[in-house]
Amino acid sequence: MAWSLKPMIWISDAMVGTASIKGFDQDNYLENNELAVDAMKRNNAGEALPANRFPKEMYAEYKDKKEKKQPDLFNAGGTWTVSSACAAVLRQFDLGDGNLYPVKLFQHDRATPVEGEYYCLNFGNQKAAVLTDQSPNIDRPYENQEVYQPPLVMKDKDIAVSAIALDGPDIWIDTKMRRAFFVSDPLAQALRAAKVSRPFKLRECIVL
């Protein structure tokens, strides 16, 4: 496959809004909710975490709803999770200090498996590449804090990044951004080729 000659970086719109959230309870949350929530926050900040900070089983939250096969990327009760097909693509790239940890999904009865194989996604990498002053459409929710996030409706070239984003791991969290993660162009094209990119909602960044 021929990659684009133009340097490209992609931001995921999956963390914006609630469309990616699926109703599951995690075994580690049921055991120690404070520790589980801490792991979710650390993962969303791009920290590398060991397998024991992630659930090994998840259970459908709603008794009267049978969960079908899940998307290739989704938020299961607070933990970002991918399908086996998506995980197979991710493993071909540089995950840096990130990782994929197997997790079993069950229906509400905690015995009947949900169709498919799934992995918790530990982003595990940070970069400081977002150029807030040169991003045409970036939100700063708190005037007194240097915290930024994508707009509620994000389009291509709303967010600008410096060329340092081209170096290092193929998936990461930016230290200046919340509710977003980034992927390299080769990874984005591979996700598309494998037909697992749709739930990532990838938007092109400006690379300066």
Image: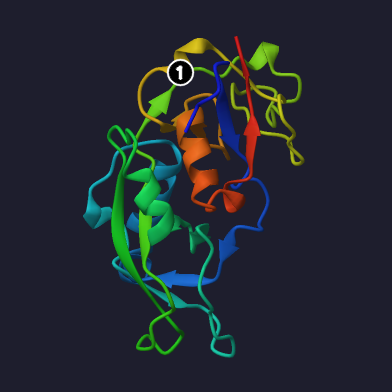
> x and y percent of residue 203 in the render?
65, 34
Image quadrant in which you'd find residue 155: top right
Kind of element beneath mark 1:
helix
Please indicate whether residue 169 sits to the left or right of residue 180 in the image. left
Q: Which residue is mark 1?
A: 166
> x and y percent of residue 111 in the render?
35, 88
Please indicate whether residue 34 sits to the left or right of residue 17 in the image. left
> x and y percent of residue 78 in the render?
48, 58
**Residue 38 seen:** no
Image quadrant in which you'd find residue 136: top right
Image quadrant in which you'd find residue 158: top right
Q: Which residue is rendered at x = 54% and y = 53% of the image?
A: 195
Picture layout, residue 184 above or below residue 51? above
Q: Quadrant of the C terminus?
A: top right
Crowding at mark 1 (Cα within 10 Å: few <14, some 14-19, many 20+): some
> x and y percent of residue 143 in the render?
70, 23
Closer-to-camera residue (39/24): 24
Closer-to-camera residue (48/121): 121
Q: Which residue is rendered at x = 75% and y = 25% of the image?
A: 137
